Image: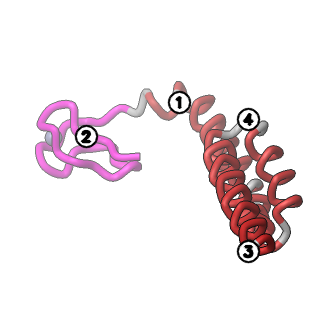
């Protein structure tokens, strides 16, 4: 999180109590008020990380075993995470493309 001096606009390090440029005293009102949002953001990032394995497995399965790719794609699409939803959509697209190609190659 970047802070700026309220007096001169100089960029400051997080723990700064005084501006290194103009010497103005820096108060830290965000330290307490942002705690909830900060925690919430970290929680969301953490839960996003938990889907990484499912996303990777989803892509691999979409290519190797489309049926499982389809299931993981739907699973990701119904999660409460924009990242999981986005990748779920791509996993489903890959699944459909691979499935279509394999069907075409069988009947050719
Ligand atoms: Zn300053």
Label 1 neighbour load within 10 Å: few <14, some 14-19, many 20+: few
Query: SS of the residue at dot 2?
Result: strand
Q: Is residue 37 above or below residue 94?
A: above
Q: Nearer the viewer, mark 3 or mark 4?
A: 3
Front position in the image: 8 or 103: 103
Mark 3 / mark 2, whichever is N-terminal: 2
Q: Is residue 5 magenta?
A: yes
| Real-space CA distance between mark 3 and mark 2, rounded to the nearest whole angstrom | 65 Å
Q: Is residue 7 magenta?
A: yes
Assign the C terminus to one quadrant of the image. Answer: bottom right
Badge number at residue 4: 2
Q: Is mark 4 within 8 Å of ligand 1?
A: no
Residue under pointer 4: 80
Mark 4 / mark 1, whichever is N-terminal: 1
Q: Is mark 1 within 8 Å of ligand 1?
A: no
Q: Position of residue 66 (x, y in %)?
A: 82, 63
Say whether residue 6 is visible: yes
Q: Nearer the viewer, mark 1 or mark 3?
A: 3
Query: SS of the residue at dot 1?
Result: loop
């Amino acid at each position: 999180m970047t802070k700026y001096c309220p007096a001169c606009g100089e960029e400051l390090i997080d723990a700064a109590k005084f501006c290194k440029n103009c010497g103005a005293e820096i108060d830290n009102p965000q330290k307490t008020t942002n705690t909830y949002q900060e925690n919430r953001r970290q929680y969301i990032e953490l839960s996003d990380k938990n889907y990484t394995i499912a996303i990777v497995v989803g892509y691999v399965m979409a290519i190797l075993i489309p049926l499982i790719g389809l299931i993981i794609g739907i699973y990701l699409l119904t999660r409460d995470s924009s990242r999981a939803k986005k990748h779920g959509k791509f996993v489903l697209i890959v699944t459909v493309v691979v499935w279509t190609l394999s069907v075409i190659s069988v009947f050719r």
